Amino acid sequence: MLLDPAVLQNPYDFYGTLREQAPVWVVPGTDVVAISTFALLSEAVARPEDFSSTMRCLLYRDQDGLPARLDFGQAAMPTLATADPPVHTTHRRAVFPELVARRMRTLEDDIRALSAAAVKQALDNGSFDFMATIGNVVPITVVARLIGFRDIDPMQLLEAAFDSTTMVGGTMSMDELNTLVARTETIEAWIADQIAGTTEGEEEGILLAVRRALDAGTLQIGEATIILHTLLSAGGESTTSLLGNAVRMLAEDPRLQQRLREKPQELDVFVEEALRLESPFRQMMRSVPHDTTLGGADIASGSTVLLLFAAGNRDRAQFDDPDRIDLTRDSPKRHLAFGHGIHFCVGAALARIEARAVLGAILEQTREFALEPDRAPQWVDSLLVRRHAQLHVCATPR
């Protein structure tokens, strides 16, 4: 059921059933456990000793259509997003959070200019695939600048970012997964060359901070390349998904479009509602180092836990009328779209800046826009991400 194509396309009824009937659900015939309520998700992320972030396997779809595990064994390398304290703390301090915050502030004007130009170019055609022209292009360009990569090919980096999240997407066959794992060596070699070519005379940035951490012995080269690959993938993927989801919601609701044109100050709340309703990352994996319990249910040592953040974000126990956009919602940022606790997404502020810039540009430069009637939105086949593969829009420019 978890990997049923219909559920992957529209998972929310299934998530509702889990919340009501099995908030801690062992997928039959597997060692995979899904957590689906806001309260239990919040508890699990606060217990890293019981629910470890160390990624010990990748999921794939077996011949019976069930999630199976490709175990790393002793090859697992805890690094930043997939590490527990104290390793996580050491890695985070090497480059975050002050440096990231400074870099974001310096990039904000550039992001607005890049977004406005991308929207203007797309509108010249009247109808366009939002993902191909704007949604994919802006985030990967921005995150590459944030890190400080040189001589970038945005499409090549985008492919590498999507490869990474596809690898963790849980829907590939074993053979497809092994091919993709091997392909990641190319981008990590490129990242290692970028690090090696960084010198003290360059602009202060994440790449230089990582190089200094390597020189000081705080990081090893394998850790450094994985950290930067993770930032590239997560930074590109999360914002790409957010932009596509938000534009689709607006394209389906002309009255909401007009309201935000008339009240642009409400755009920030709309972004939070888009994040909550269509969380860019549906779930995150945790490993279980010893027998434990959650919500009164036993979870066996060695299990792989899926924290279904997207399910928690529509939990009626936490949100009134959770399946509806509500621009008057109290505490709109009180959702799990960027995770929770020590692994709260370091790029959350950047994603919000990009969303405001892109959505603001579309609303300012159009009288109206809608989905192309004969070209339905297409979703990426993934248990991890909620991203449009295609989103065809027709627009009337101002």
Image (spheres, helix red, strand yellow):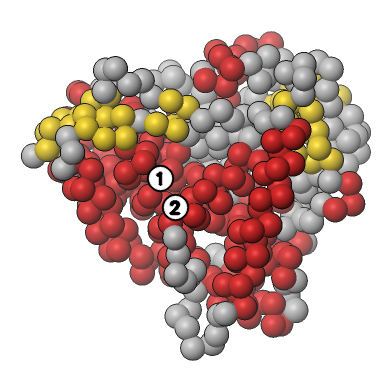
* Residue 130 position within the rendered picture, expressed as x and y whole percent measured from the top left: 32, 37
Q: Nearer the viewer, residue 267 or 303?
A: 303
Q: Residue at x 44, y 45 (%)?
A: 239
* Residue 5 position within the rendered picture, expressed as x and y whole percent measured from the top left: 59, 17
Q: Nearer the viewer, residue 302 or 164?
A: 164
* Residue 206 position within the rendered picture, expressed as x and y whole percent measured from the top left: 53, 70
Q: Which residue is mark 1?
A: 136
Q: Residue at x 84, y 46 (%)?
A: 72
Mark 2: which secondary structure?
Answer: helix
Left or right of 95? Residue 158 is left
Q: Residue at x 36, y 51 (%)?
A: 138
Say which quarter of the image contains residue 50: top right
Q: Earlier in the sequence, mark 2 or mark 1?
A: 1
Say which quarter of the image contains residue 398: top left
Density class for disc 1 (Cα within 10 Å; few <14, some 14-19, many ≥20) is: many
Density class for disc 2 (Cα within 10 Å; few <14, some 14-19, many ≥20) is: few
Q: Which residue is mark 2?
A: 155
Left or right of 99? Residue 305 is right
Q: Give above or below for 183 relative to 192.
A: above
**Disc 2 + disc 1, Cβ < 8 Å:** no
Kindly tell me whether residue 28 is visible in this rendering: yes
Q: Amino acid at mark 1?
A: Asn
Q: Quadrant of the N terminus?
A: top right
Left or right of 140? Residue 199 is right
Left or right of 26? Residue 254 is left
Q: Nearer the viewer, residue 61 or 313?
A: 61
Q: Amino acid at mark 2?
A: Met
* Residue 95 position within the rendered picture, expressed as x and y whole percent measured from the top left: 59, 69
Q: Give above or below for 338 relative to 173.
A: below
